[in-house]
């Protein structure tokens, strides 16, 4: 706490003097000043002045002398001092009431701010959810747009249907050709099998004929040899 400056001997200026008070001492001093209505450290406190006025008035009343005028003067002085002392009290009460109202307003404002903070947090959470939903919706729209572009580059449905019809006709023609080819191949297989059978029969016949021819030639040779043997014996008998 900084007190008023004091003059230092030999110097013209005023040097401030620091009195170190702790928080507790400051609270005691402030409380004392509020109770005694003392705003400065100089001069007589109002409460003490009021006490002196009251004491003077009481002492004057207790005297046995005829001093009504003095008692009235002291009573007026006491009442005046009491009024003077009461005015700051009323001011203090008004200040206290104002502070209480301000405190209530502050508490209400604090509650309102807290409520707004909670509401803002809830709004933020809702906005986060809406943002996520918007992202998903945007993704779906982008996918739909990509599919739309793919569909746009494709030929129209009539053209596609015409191409499908042509392909079906080509497939039917190829199936018909395949069926005809299969039938022709089956016929060729049967003809070839018949040919192989005929060739086999012909080969068997030729082999049989060759066997018969060889047998006939062998028998002819045997007959020819028998005849030569017979003619040779006749000649020998003739020589003899």
Image (cartoon, rainbow, N blue to C red):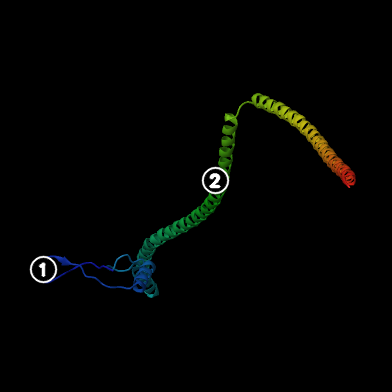
| Residue placed under numbered mark 2 in the picture | 131
- Which structural element holds mark 2? helix
Q: Position of residue 240 (x, y in %)?
A: 89, 47
Q: Position of residue 46 (x, y in %)?
A: 34, 67
| Vertical side of 91 occupied by 1: above or below | below
Q: Quadrant of residue 10?
A: bottom left
| Callout 1–callout 2 Cβ contact below 8 Å | no
Task: Note whether residue 147 is visible.
Answer: yes
**Left or right: 216 with respect to 108?**
right
| Residue placed under numbered mark 1 in the picture | 11
**Left or right: 99 with respect to 228?**
left
Depth check, mark 1 against mark 2: the one in front is 2
Task: Note whether residue 67 is visible.
Answer: no
- The foreground one among 225 and 34 is 225
Q: Position of residue 193 (x, y in %)?
A: 80, 37
- Which structural element holds mark 1? loop
- The foreground one among 159 and 217 is 217
| Vertical side of 64 occupied by 160: above or below | above
Q: How far, Cα to Cα, is label 1 from label 2? A: 76 Å
| Vertical side of 199 occupied by 14: above or below | below
Assign the N terminus to one quadrant of the image: bottom left
Q: Quadrant of residue 42?
A: bottom left
Q: Position of residue 176 (x, y in %)?
A: 75, 28
């Amino acid at each position: 706490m900084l007190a008023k400056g004091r003059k230092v001997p030999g110097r013209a200026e005023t040097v401030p003097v620091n009195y170190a008070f702790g928080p507790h001492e400051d609270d005691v001093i402030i409380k004392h000043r509020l109770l005694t209505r003392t705003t400065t450290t100089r001069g007589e406190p109002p409460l003490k002045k009021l006490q002196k006025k009251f004491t003077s008035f009481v002492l004057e009343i207790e005297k046995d002398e005829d001093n009504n005028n003095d008692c009235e003067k002291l009573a007026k002085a006491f009442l005046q001092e009491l009024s003077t002392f009461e005015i700051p009290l009323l001011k203090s009460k008004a200040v206290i009431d104002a502070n209480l109202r301000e405190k209530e307003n502050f508490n209400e404002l604090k509650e309102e701010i807290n409520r707004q903070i909670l509401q803002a947090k809830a709004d933020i959470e809702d906005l986060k959810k809406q943002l996520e939903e918007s992202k998903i919706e945007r993704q779906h729209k982008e996918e739909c747009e990509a599919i739309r572009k793919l569909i746009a580059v494709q030929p129209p449905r009539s053209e596609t249907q015409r191409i499908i019809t042509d392909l079906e006709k080509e497939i039917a023609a190829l199936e018909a050709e395949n069926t005809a080819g299969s039938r022709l191949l089956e016929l060729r297989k049967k003809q070839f099998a018949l040919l192989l059978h005929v060739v086999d029969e012909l080969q068997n016949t030729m082999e049989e004929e060759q066997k018969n021819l060889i047998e006939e030639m062998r028998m002819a040779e045997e007959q020819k040899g028998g005849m030569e043997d017979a003619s040779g014996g006749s000649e020998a008998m003739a020589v003899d």
